[in-house]
Image (spheres, rainbow, N blue to C red):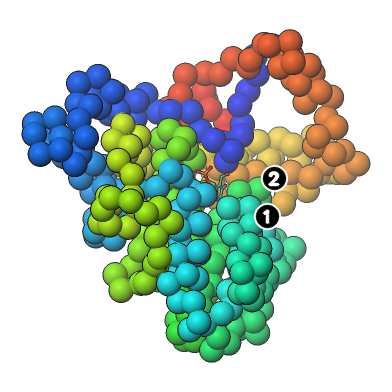
Amino acid sequence: MNDIYLDYNATTPLDPMVAEAMLPYIHGLYGNPSSGHFFGRAARAGVDHARSQVASLLGCATDDLIFTSGGTEANNHAIKGVAWANRGRRNHIITSTIEHPAVTEVCRWLETQGYRVSFVPVDEHGMVDLRQVEEAISPDTLLVTIMHANNEVGTIQPIAEIAEIAHRYGALMHTDCAQSVGKIPVRVDDLGVDLLSIAGHKLYAPKGIGALYIRPGVRLEKLMHGANHEQDRRAGTENVIEMAGLGKACELIEQNLDDYARYMSRMRDRLEQGLLSASPDRRINGHPEKRLPNTSSVAFRGLEADRHPRQSAQRRRLRRGRLPQRPGGGLPRPGSDERTH
Ligand SMILES: Cc1ncc(COP(=O)(O)O)c(C=O)c1O
């Protein structure tokens, strides 16, 4: 039996067009973007082009974006960077109880450094209640960091409204968009955020690349000290190959998002209808409408996901060294049934 890969919120395969965009920087254009000669200038042009592709998707200026090693680093940089740059001014951070560890653990660590953190709960649909944010916020709040869309149930948070509350109290707003970019429109001004993280491997780019949007004027301490790469905000020779991949993935999303989203939600709904009609003892988790088009979380009464017999069989096969066969990578092609999630 062929395995079917449905875990696209964990990671996506590389889109063949993304891989193709990376090839020139693997084979011929291997220069260091900081070098002044032909090879360096060609690599620099690749970095600049990739940045403009990401910026275009997010609706921001290229100068307001830095590349990172992924969503985790972008979140760390945003949260720790703001905390360190404003040490002694304000001391309070608000986040939610459903964040990825790449936010929760940063906040927990900051607690050990003397910062106060409020974890606002969510309702039965996984939605943050604006009144809870209003109750938690105070003139001491430095940063509100709440994910745009949840990786497990796909609920989309009211980020623009939360940002409005944050700004009313003079706090900054960060959102982790690792799961939303590529599935729904994500524009920095529509969301009204000061900082926004993205993760390449959730959107058909490679693992190990991401980006952080930083609104002009936001004071942010560096995580990586060294040479003056990335507008002197993140030191380290640029990962040109993966930047080219992330740029191409963003370009493909910008051109095709409506089609992708329509296709993903059609497949999601078909899957859920099939599961629900097979037995009434199933429940769809997450918000009924404000949910990512690709994400389906279904609860089966009396069944724990990790105990499912099929998972045990897969584990046994993996232990014997048999890796699952996956179809070739690529963004979902509307109209084709090759991908069901
Ligand atoms: C919501 C969310 N934030 C952050 C991350 C971390 O991103 P990365 O794996 O690129 O470090 C993930 C990845 O699972 C995620 O789902």
Q: Is residue 97 shown left or right of residue 188? A: right
Question: Measured from the top left, where is residue 223 in percent x and y?
Answer: 43, 56
SS under mark 1: loop
User: Which of the labelled discs sits on residue 56, or is there none?
Assistant: none
Question: Which residue appears at 34% of the width and 25% of the height?
Answer: 19
- Residue 61 picture quarter: bottom left
Circle 1 residue? 286
User: Which of the labelled discs sits on residue 297, or is there none?
Assistant: 2
Question: Measured from the top left, where is residue 166 in percent x and y?
Answer: 50, 79
- The crowd level at tag 2 (other Cα within 10 Å; few <14, some 14-19, many 20+) is some
Tell me the amino acid under the disc marked 1. Answer: Gly
Is residue 114 visible to us here?
yes
Tell me the amino acid under the disc marked 2. Answer: Ser
What's the CA distance linking mark 2 and mark 1?
A: 7 Å
Is residue 99 visible to us here?
no
Q: Is residue 155 above or below residue 24?
A: below
Going from N to C along the chain, the mark reached first, 2 or 1, is 1
Q: Is residue 205 shown left or right of residue 312? A: left
- Residue 33 picture quarter: top left
**Tags 2 and 1 in contact by the CB under 8 Å rule?**
yes
